[in-house]
C-alpha cells in the first residue's frame, strides 16, 4: 500500500487485475487447504486412513459406546498402560464417536480378520490385540473371533492376544490357536455366582 499507481490507466491495468487475482488466488488456496483438512478429518473419523503407531493396543469389534469407553478407561487407569495408543477396528461402525475421539482412540474400518485391514492398523508393531465378542453376530461370534485370533497369531505371534469367548466349549479351540488370554464370560459368571454363595460380598470386592 505504500506504492500505488496514480493514473487511471495504471490503476485500471495494475490495481484491478492485482486485486482480482490476489483475492481469487487467496480464496482458492484457502478453499483447497480447508477442503483437504476437512477431507482428511472425515476420512480419519470414518476409519479410511492408515495409522502409524507402535506398542499400541488394537481393539477388534465395536461392542457399543459404553463398553468401549469403559475398556479404554480401564486401560488408561493403569500407569503401565496409561499412555498406550488405542486403535479400534470394526467393519460396521460408520464413524468414530466424539467421546472416543476425545479419548485419543484411532479407528480403522474393516474386517479384523483381513491382513490388509490389520496392516492399516499397523498390527505388526502392536503390543496387544483385544478381540471382543461380536454383538452383531452373537451366535457365530466365537467362530469369527477364532479367525481373527488365528490371523494375529499367524502373522504377528509376538502380540499378546486377549480374546472374549462366549461358549465355554469353544475355549479349547482358542487354546490350540495359542491365544495368550481367553476370557469366557459364561464360565466367569458361574464362578462368581458360586463364590458369592460361599463368600457373601465377594462380588462387591
Image (cartoon, helix red, strand yellow):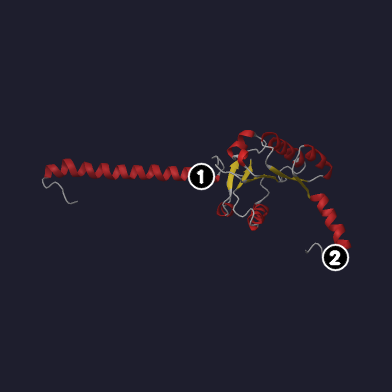
Label 2, label 1: how many angstroms apart (C-alpha)?
A: 51 Å
Task: Name the residue at 46% across, 45% down.
Answer: 38
Q: Earlier in the sequence, mark 2 or mark 1?
A: 1
Q: Position of residue 27 (x, y in %)?
A: 33, 45
Image quadrant of residue 117? top right
Instruction: Tally the marks.
Output: 2
Q: Please give the label number shown on residue 69.
A: none
Q: Local crowd at mark 2 within 10 Å, few (<14), some, or many (≥20)?
A: few
Taking 3 as reference, is 197 left or right?
right
Task: Judge the density around disc 1: few (<14), some (14-19), many (≥20) Cα neighbours within 10 Å.
Answer: some
Residues under numbered marks 2 and 1 in contact, where contact means CB atoms less than 8 Å apart: no
Please state if 51 lies on the left or on the right of 136 as rendered: left
Secondary structure at numbered mark 2: loop
Numbered disc 1: secondary structure: helix
Q: Which of the two residues, 95 or 121, is positioned nearer the viewer here?
A: 121
Q: Residue furthest left?
A: 7
Image location of residue 160, percent across then percent down: 69, 44
Residue 66 is drawn in which quadrant?
bottom right
Could you tell me residue 166's position as x and y percent?
Answer: 79, 46
The residue sitting at 38% across, 44% down in the picture is 31
Which residue has dot 1 on it?
42
Residue annotated with mark 2: 200
Amino acid at each position: 500500500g505504500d506504492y500505488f499507481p496514480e493514473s487511471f490507466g495504471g490503476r485500471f491495468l495494475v490495481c484491478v487485475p492485482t486485486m482480482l487475482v490476489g483475492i481469487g488466488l487467496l480464496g482458492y488456496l484457502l478453499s483447497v487447504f480447508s477442503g483437504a483438512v476437512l477431507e482428511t478429518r472425515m476420512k480419519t473419523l470414518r476409519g479410511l486412513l492408515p495409522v502409524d503407531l507402535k506398542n499400541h493396543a488394537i481393539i477388534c469389534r465395536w461392542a457399543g459406546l459404553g463398553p468401549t469407553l469403559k475398556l479404554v478407561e480401564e486401560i488408561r487407569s493403569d500407569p503401565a498402560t496409561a499412555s498406550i495408543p488405542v486403535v479400534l477396528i470394526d467393519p460396521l461402525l460408520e464413524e468414530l464417536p466424539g467421546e472416543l475421539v476425545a479419548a485419543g482412540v484411532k479407528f480403522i474400518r474393516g474386517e479384523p480378520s483381513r491382513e490388509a485391514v490389520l496392516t492399516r492398523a499397523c498390527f505388526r508393531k502392536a503390543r496387544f490385540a483385544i478381540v471382543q465378542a461380536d454383538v452383531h453376530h452373537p451366535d457365530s461370534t466365537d467362530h469369527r473371533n477364532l479367525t481373527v485370533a488365528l490371523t494375529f497369531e499367524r502373522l504377528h505371534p509376538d502380540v499378546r492376544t486377549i480374546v472374549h469367548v462366549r461358549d465355554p466349549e469353544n475355549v479349547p479351540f482358542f487354546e490350540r490357536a495359542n491365544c495368550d488370554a481367553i476370557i469366557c464370560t459364561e464360565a466367569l459368571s458361574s464362578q462368581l455366582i458360586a463364590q458369592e454363595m460361599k463368600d457373601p460380598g465377594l462380588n462387591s470386592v
